[in-house]
Image: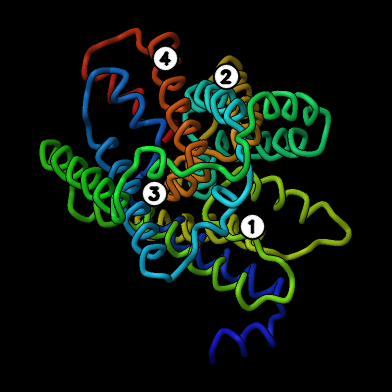
Amino acid sequence: MDIISLAERLGDPGLAAMAGLVTGIVFGLSAEQSRFCLRAAAVEVARGQLGPRLSVWLLTFSTALLWTQAMDRFGVIDLGTSRWLASPGTVSGAILGGLIFGVGMILARGCPGRLLVLGATGNLRAILSGLVFAVIGQMTLHGALSPLRQAISGGWVTAGPTPSLLAEMRMPDGGGLALAALFALGALVIAARNRVAPLTLVFGSGVGFAVAVGWVLSYTLSRISFDPVPVGSLTFSGPSADTLMFVLSDSPVLDFDVGLVPGVALAAFASAWLSGRLKWQGWHSAEAMRRYLLGAGLMAFGAMTAGGCTIGAGVTGASTFAVTAWLALTSMWIAAMVTDRVFDNRRQAPAGLASAASFGD
């Protein structure tokens, strides 16, 4: 059955939800197996170590860049139609939102994608933090925090469509592929020095491949759908809020985002179950609970202001080389490392590093 026939049977909303489900399954399985997390990578760098978590993040990042740029170059997708490059971008939102998100990520000990994966394995801290993230995210988009978000985002907006970093750097054709290859080489060197298991690298690359899957499916839907379909891929800021409203609304609407979150949760649960990693976990103190929930709230506001989370802006957006996505990603890294140095890095011993990098497992 071809995609046209499938669209006729399921309808555009159903097909979009199925596309999100497939993308989420690829991400959920790969992220649970590789323990992908930007927060853990930032902690390693902040503490002066190029460790295994950094290698996994770099491999994910380079894989997403490589597939996305290759597909755009050979006409499989058109990144110029994505929201990252087709519309004006907010520079102030990317920087300030990214900084706020980075602080929250350290406090919550994980990014939204990681919280969703951990929640599916029985981590109650991640489940409640994820719910707070979704609620505050909805408030930031359409509720009480929306005016503040708009004020920050409107401070500095690009004139016209968001410029490409490749164009600003005057890179030749294929420059994105070359940069992706450099990131991949760096990832493999760091992985070799830390003796990262080959299977972990495969699944780390799978997280980046999930971004490519999302691009292909959403772009294909945009070409065959009667209704406008945004061209994008993985992100967890908007989808978290959309999924929450889907289950609370009396007139729910299926779309890519609503299929994505259940796909991630189901795949992560199955992966943890088959690997023997399902385990109920909670908080050890009220202080820890306050920290997690404050971090989740800051991440939600920061992600909505920056235009995406560590996946949405930091991998999906960055794979288009949109300037605002790279500004958001850089801000997240800086804020995360500074916050770790201020709040968590009281012990420099290797044991302390290993404990901090566990990010709530």
Q: What numbered label is drawn on residue 338?
A: 4
Give the residue type that dot 3 points to: Arg
User: Relative to residue 134, is residue 33 drawn left or right?
Assistant: left
Instruction: Name the one closer to the observer, 220 or 335.
Output: 220
Give the residue type that dot 4 points to: Val
Work out which quarter of the rendered image holds the C terminus and state it.
top left
If you read the primary sequence from the N terminus, does the residue marked by circle 2 or circle 1 appear first? 1
If you read the primary sequence from the N terminus, does the residue marked by circle 2 or circle 3 appear first? 3
Q: Residues within 10 Å of mark 4 (few under 14, many from 20)?
A: some
Where is residue 150? Give x, y as percent. 74, 30
Disc 3 versus disc 4: nearer the observer: 4
**Do residues under tags 4 and 2 come within 8 Å of each other at their CB atoms?**
no
Where is residue 250? Give x, y as percent. 88, 59
Question: Coloured how?
Answer: rainbow
Disc 4 versus disc 2: nearer the observer: 4
Q: Is residue 223 above or below residue 288?
A: below
